[in-house]
Image: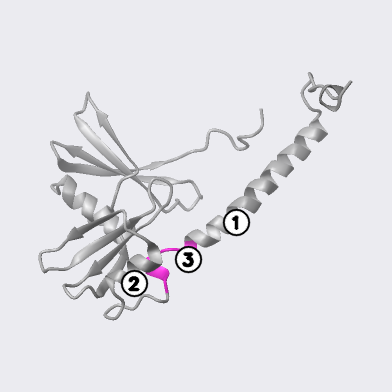
């Protein structure tokens, strides 16, 4: 018998002790992997970059530091806005406003609570997209005639992920809502 056939897969479910040990190992591995990502998420982004200085930093520097933006658009005064969205998995959308001399005027998170509160009935889809950045997803509900866009935003106080939803009808904001995202299972690797 070779090494591959010497130890067949167990046919019975693991005993309680083995299940508890496996659960503890899965939890430890998940936490160990998530901790660095959580720390990086808190400090990553143009809004927290110490090199960025409004009035002095340029658009070329921003692009050199942070790469090409997901979108950029021209402003009426000759400036432009760069969008660094972390959707569909992140919870931020850093917007960098440059003046007509390509100098940074302002940096803000389009998914901050004050930005979300500014989404009111009557805004167009383009206005919403420019204020919040690229959405996570879009779903059209045939019976209600609503086109719903959503964004991942900061979790609720209990730690559950939250989605901010904007409901459009005929291309105009009808209302907004929030959805909590509950996990399917506490330990997804356990059978």
Disc nearer the start of the sequence (3/2): 3
Is 45 colored magenta in this rendering? yes
- Compared to 160, does 48 lie above or below? below
**Which label belongs to residue 35?**
1
Q: Residue 47: where, in percent of width, then height?
A: 37, 68
Most common secondary structure along the magenta stretch: helix
Marker count (numbered):
3
Is residue 116 in sight in this rendering? yes
Determine whether label 1 and label 3 are within 8 Å by CB. Answer: no
Q: Is the C-beta separation of discs 1 and 2 under 8 Å?
A: no
Which residue does the numbered mark 2 point to in the structure image? 61
Q: Where is residue 119 in the image (x, y as percent from the top left)?
A: 22, 52
Nearer to the camera, 100 or 135: 100
Q: What crowding class fits label 3: few (fewer than 14 Cα within 10 Å), some (14-19), or many (20 or more)?
A: few
Residue 14 in which image quadrant? top right
Q: What's drawn in magenta, residue-wise?
A: 42-49
Identify the residue at horizontal 20%, vertical 65% (top origin). Answer: 80
Residue 169 image position (x, y, % from top left): 16, 36
């Amino acid at each position: 018998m070779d090494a591959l056939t010497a130890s067949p897969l167990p046919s019975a479910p693991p005993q309680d002790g083995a299940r508890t040990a496996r659960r503890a190992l899965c939890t430890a591995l998940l936490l160990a992997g998530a901790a660095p990502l959580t720390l990086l998420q808190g400090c990553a982004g143009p809004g927290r970059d110490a090199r960025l200085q409004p009035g002095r930093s340029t658009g070329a520097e921003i692009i050199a530091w942070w790469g090409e933006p997901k979108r950029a658009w021209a402003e009426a005064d000759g400036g432009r806005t760069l969008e660094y969205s972390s959707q569909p998995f992140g919870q931020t959308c850093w917007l960098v406003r440059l003046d007509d001399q390509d100098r940074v005027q302002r940096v803000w998170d389009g998914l901050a609570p004050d930005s979300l509160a500014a989404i009111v009935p009557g805004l167009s889809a383009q206005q919403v997209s420019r204020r919040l950045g690229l959405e996570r997803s879009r779903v059209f509900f045939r019976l209600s005639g609503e086109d719903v866009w959503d964004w991942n935003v900061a979790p609720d106080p209990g730690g559950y992920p939250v989605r901010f939803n904007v409901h459009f009808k005929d291309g105009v904001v009808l209302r907004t809502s929030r959805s909590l995202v509950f996990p399917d299972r506490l330990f997804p690797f356990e059978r």
